[in-house]
Image: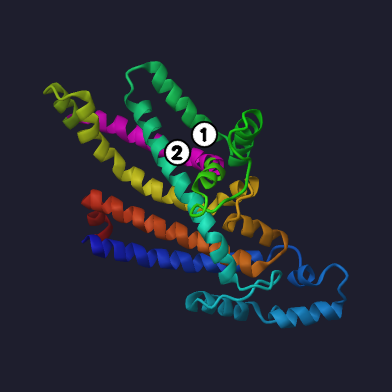
Amino acid sequence: MTARYLLRRALSLLVTLLLASVAIFGLLRLVPGSTAAAVAGADASPEQLAAIEADLGLHRPLPAQYGSWLHGILTGDLEKSYVLGRPIGELIRGGLGATLQLTLAASLIAAVLGFLLGVLAATARNRLVRGAAKTVTTLALAVPPYASGTVLIAVFAVALPVLPPGGHASLAKDPDLAVQFLLLPAVCLALPVAAVLARFLADGLQSALGEDYTRAAAGLGVRRRRLILRHALPNALAPVITVAAVQVGNLLAGSAIVEALFAWPGLGQLLIQSIVSHDLLVVQDLLLLAVAAFVVLQLLGEAARAWLDPRIALRGAS
C-alpha cells in the first residue's frame, strides 16, 4: 500500500516538474532584454545581432527551442552558456559541490536549532524560557537572510573579527579554514528554516501532550522526560519531517542571496551572474534543477512520513 501511494505521488510530481519546465521557459522569454545583445555588446549592429541569434538558435519558433531544451535535459546533453561559452553541465558541476556543502551545513544547524527551540517552546516549565524560545523563533522567521547576514558580518567579522566575512576554502585541503568560511553563511541560511521547524515541532508537541494517552501515562506516574521523548515526540515528528524536506528544498532554491552576500562560489552565485548577463539557458537549467531538488526532497519527506504513519499511505492510496 505504501509503494502504491509513493508511485502515485511520484507520477504527480513528474507532471508538476513538466509543468514547471513549461512555466520557466515561458516566463524567461518575457524578461526584457536581448540575449544576443548581451553576447555581442552594446555597439553591435542589427546584422551582427541577427547573425548571433541564428547561431544560438534564437531565431527558431519557441516550441522548437523548448523541445531542444527538454531533449537536452532528458538526455543529459546540456548546451553551452551563451555568455561564458562553456558547457552548462561543467558550470553546474563547478558550483554544485559548494552549494551542497552550504546546504548540508545549514540543514544540520537548522535541524539542531529547530529541535531545541521547538522542544523548549512547548515543554519548558519556566515561562521565561518558553517566551525566549518563541521570541527567537519569531525573529529568525521575520528577518530576511540578507538582513541577518549583514548583522552576522557586522558582529562576527567586523566588531568581533573572529570569522571571515566571505569566501571559500576546500574542505578536503584546509578543513579548519573551510569551516570558518562556512559557518556564517550556513547560520544565515539556517535561521528561517530552524524557525519553521521549531514552530511545527512545538505545535505538534503541545497537541500530543494534550492527548488522552499522554495524560493517562502522566497519571500513571511516567516521568515527564520519558513522556516527551517516548510518547509525545514520535507523534509530533511525522509532520515535521515533511516540512523539513520542503525546507531543505527551499535552502537549495533560496541560497542565491546568501551566496552572493558571503561570496560563496555556488550555484546561487552562478544564477545571479547568469541573470545579470541575460544568459537564459543557464538560468532556466538552474531554475529547473532547483524545482527538481524541491520535488525529490518532498517525495522523500512524504515517504518518511508514510513510513512513520502508515495511515497516510492508506488515505493516499484509497
Give, as a three-letter code, the residue at label 2. Ala
Image x and y of residue 86, in percent: 65, 72
Image x and y of residue 302, in percent: 33, 54
Is 101 drawn above or below residue 67 in the view shown?
above
Give, as a three-letter code, the residue at label 1. Ala
Callout 2 touching callout 1 (CB < 8 Å): yes
The magenta stretch is 184-212
Question: What residue did someone put label 1 on?
Answer: 140
135 left or right, relative to 161: left
Report the residue at 37% width, 36% height from top.
115
Mark earlier in primary sequence (2, 1): 1
47 left or right, relative to 163: right
> Mark 2 packing: few (<14 Cα in 10 Å), some, or many (20+)?
many
Position of the C terminus by quadrant:
bottom left
Report the residue at 56% width, 71% height from top.
89
Residue 91, magenta (yes or no): no
How far is the residue under mark 2 from the one under mark 1? Answer: 8 Å
Which residue is at the front of the view, 172 or 218?
Answer: 172
Question: What residue did someone put label 2 on?
Answer: 194
Which residue is at the front of the view, 274 or 309?
Answer: 274
Report the residue at 17% width, 31% height from top.
213
Image x and y of residue 160, in percent: 62, 29
Report the residue at 23% width, 26% height from top.
225
Q: Majority secondary structure of the magenta segment?
A: helix
Figure label count: 2
